[in-house]
Amino acid sequence: MASHATHVHTPPSGFIRKYIFSMDHKVIGIQYYFLALFSVFVGMTLSVLMRFHMVYPDAKVGFFETLWPTGAPGGVMTPELYLSLMTMHGTIMVFFVLTTAPQGGFGNYFLPIQIGAEDMAFPFLNMLSFWTTFVALMVLMAAFFVQGGAPLGGWTAYAPLSALGEIAGPGQGKGMNLWIISIALFCGASLMGAINFISTLIDLRVPGMTLMRMPLTCWAWFVTAILSLLGFAVLLAAGVLLLMDRMVGTSFFLPAGLVVNDQILNHKGGSPLLWQHLFWFFGHPEVYIAILPGMGLASNILSVFARKTIFGYRAMVYAILGIGFLGFVVWGHHMFISGMNPYTAIAFSVMTMAIGVPSAIKTFNWIGTLWGAQIRLTTAMLFALGFVSLFVSGGISGIFLGQPGLDLYLHDTYFVVGHFHMIMGVAAIFGMFAGTFFWFPKASGRMMNETLGKIHFYATFIGVYAIFTPMHVLGIIGNPRRYADYKEFEFMGPAMSVHTFMTYAAIFTAAVQIIFVINLIWSMMKGAKAPDNPWEATSLEWSIPSPPPFDNFGGKHLTVHHGPYEYGVPGKAKDYVMQIDPE
Amino acid sequence: MLLALLNWVITLATVGLFAGKYWWFPEGINEHAHRYDGHFMTTLYITGVIFFLAQMSLGWTIFRYRSNGGRAAYVEGNNTMEVVWTVGAAVLFIGAVLMSTEIWTGVHMAETPADALTIELNAKQFAFNFRYAGADGKFGKTDIKQISDANGNPFGVDEKDPAGKDDVTSSAIRVPAGKPILLKMKSRDVIHNFFVRELRVKQDVVPGMEIPLHFQADKPGSYEVPCSELCGLGHHQMRSSLIVMPPADFEKWLKDEDQKLKQQ
Amino acid sequence: MALSETLQGPPPTSVEASGWGGDPGKQRRASITGVYVLFAAITMLFAAFTSAMVVRRGLGDDWTGFPLPGILWVSTAFILLSSVALELAQRALIHSAKDGRQQFARLWSLGTLLGLLFLGSQYMAWRQLQAAGVYVSSSPGSSFFYLLTVAHAVHVLGGVAALLYIEAQALLLQLGPAKRTAVEVCRLYWHFLAGLWVYLILVLKIWG
């Protein structure tokens, strides 16, 4: 942690200091963003391979054998390969996409600017947090290349399966060790990032930028950082205990009397449920870490392009705080069926239903913001509106799953898979797309192509609904999760047509993402020059040049006079008042 | 506007998908299943209405309030509305879960009836094995060192224990229709899960724990049991059957199995 | 040149030249906030370990404790005294004008030495246990003992690195007002680790 009494902001020189080992929060934000972009393409490819296998499990595909000679002999994907692709898909998406871009990417870039600071509080720590994340990703990817391949226990790595080592299955040896080390590194990186975000937000706001004048993006990043701080520390603890069970013969998660592959094991009275408690104590806040920045961003973008102040700013702040706090007391809803005490299950379910309330409040306030508005349908706005639609759809299925009585059937079915993909795999991703279109002009000094943006939006919006809505119905038919294929089960016969539909929807949607990449790259090189404030928005980042100078405000000392959503203010010449406008 | 239209169409299609029940629960085979289905529908109606109204009004705002060069009204909020929809959501959500408590307690907090038939489950990578106490009504002691799948002793019944001589082991679970069952579940290696769709019941089987599961099946038939907790590369092939038999047929089956054991 | 200068350029020559809108106090305040935030994270880590221990203890009747090596009380003395030394050192730096820096250097060196002795005594405790045949996997109690003490020692190692850094700065007489925050943050971190140690040894004594 850099703890020098005075902070100096001299511009860096040399390519390496400017673009590789940079301590500038803007460069680091972009680095996180591109790490996430790379990761999402890897994760998406894995998911297409998974969807293909579920529908054509016996297909012989030449390049499978080339890539995975042991995992796909004769070009036919084995179940263990399928499960390892699934494990890596979940791990990469949850950690290296949803926990990087929204916070480390957009947050790093725009939090300091939105509160008037020249940089994050600890620029050296910031740089360290990105490069640690990068190393963590490299370590994770290495799991594909070691003997036995990547682990197959899912991103949730339940013990004993994850603690037993090689005897539990291929990939559970070296691959699993690399997985744990990667996650432990990721925990460290997240903790460093959280320290930076919290300190920056508390101490580096300029005069006039009171907490209640911060854009909702800042509130979201703040609460997300607190969730990260407390949650990742517990995941780190769990990872250490798991590594010890695997490597030094302890029995934190391994009970006595295990017989695996005809071998009697010597462990002493550990608890598989302990892993689940520790993991989900982190895991539930994690999903709020994934969605809160998107919610803040949706609020922000909706207000800008509705040309109308956010409906219920205070309620929105309380909702973010409520979600953050309640997010820590609902983890047991992942464990209703685990063998946990049934009374505890009831307690968790009441809290889980309670957390639906602030989410509902936010949705109503978004609609309230749009009511009577003057909507400008830019691509950023389309994605923000799409976010709201998908958040409603994804959140609604939570009402079923939060009730243990209903979870008795729906647990570990595709109902759950549909629920979390709708929320994380789509709504949160739409938040990232919205952020890209919104802030690209500021960060690059160029505009993105609106036509390509709109085509990409509509195709993706239709595509994701096509992929994930049917999953809920598959859950109702009882479709279990994490099955490499369904050949053994008669009841799955009628479901195969649904699976085929979803597979083609997935291939279509994945292919359509190319339009986004083309738009991004082309615009970076040839996009039209962007003015300082193309969207006529009010927060601090729109009062500086596009792209910003290295110290954001060019040495100016700012004072903030207004709240962040002064749109449609009566009696003013323009329909917006910037936060730093004098009166 | 295209997005409004799209949102409405998707909403209607989704409502239709659920209302049409093209892919739906299998018919329940006990009282619990009927209560389950009833509450599922209640939740579906509540969420369906919320879903429909929220998505329709979202679409409406996109359609109705497109920019026309004017200025939007400056509305900071409405505290009354905030209170109304906060309380409303709380009542609906928490009310729903409280209504469902009976379904949960019925499975997990019920007293074991005196006449319940006790069956033991031992799950392993990648098979379910069930054990019946046989004519003497007692389960023989087990010893993990005597586990031998090859010799038909997946439970490791201690050959020195006479009570175990008449224990019947089976890879399918057979039960008499209309009788309460107590399934005592154990796992040998990793976490597995016992799930029968028609019973509307699912429970993880955890190594190091013995987890009791109460159920009753009223309709004879054979029902598939898919393992529902990732347990390794054979997870998708870990299958058993719940075979519900008229009580007389069940008694006959158990007697026949006992005979076979005596002859060994 | 110090590492910090290589990375961030030479220190500013006037208050105006420093960042944060011309308010040098901001970096100081942010650093103090940052270290307290770090405490929250470390607390959660050890809370998770503690809860794992409590759960494990309650799981069955196979929990066997074992007598804590006596040297652990010496460890406790070392870390508490080291905390006191650092506290006095900080006060010397702030309150005495003339020989404040010399006082500081002496006390800080004492604190650093005691910190190193703490680590040394920890190492001896582990060796003693191993000589008695108590390894990390010997029993659930011993697993937690090694887990908690090693995890704490790893954090102390980081703390010692920070102490040595300040030590080097003090010896090179580069402890101007700009470095006061570094001293304050290190000392706070060290107090936290001392407090954490007291908590851990009580947990191990009472529940071990």
Image (cartoon, helix red, strand yellow):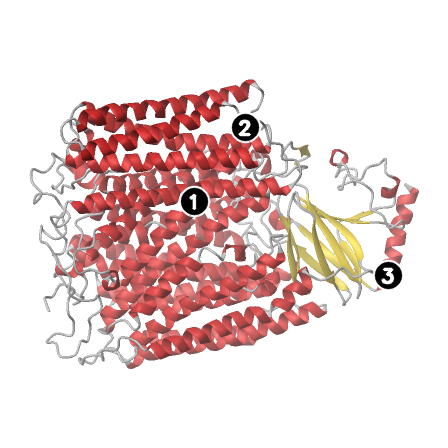
Mark 3 — on which chain does it sit?
B
| Disc assigned to residue C136 | 2
Mark 1 — on which chain does it sit?
C
| Disc assigned to residue C44 | 1
Give me the residue at 66% from left, 64% from top.
Answer: B105
Q: What crowding class fits label 3: few (fewer than 14 Cα within 10 Å), some (14-19), or many (20 or more)?
A: some
In the image, residue A152 sits, relative to residue A360, either above or below, namely: above
| Disc assigned to residue C108 | none
Mark 1 residue type: Met
* Picture coordinates of residue A495, whole percent (x, y): 57, 63
* Picture coordinates of residue B98, whole percent (x, y): 57, 69
Q: Is residue A87 left or right of residue C177?
A: right
Q: Is residue A519 left or right of residue A512?
A: left
Distance in Å between CA atoms under marks 3 and 1? 58 Å
Most distant residue in the top direction = C131
Mark 3 residue type: Asp
* Picture coordinates of residue B171, whole percent (x, y): 75, 49
- Tags 2 and 1 on a common chain: yes
Q: Is residue C204 left or right of residue A123?
A: right
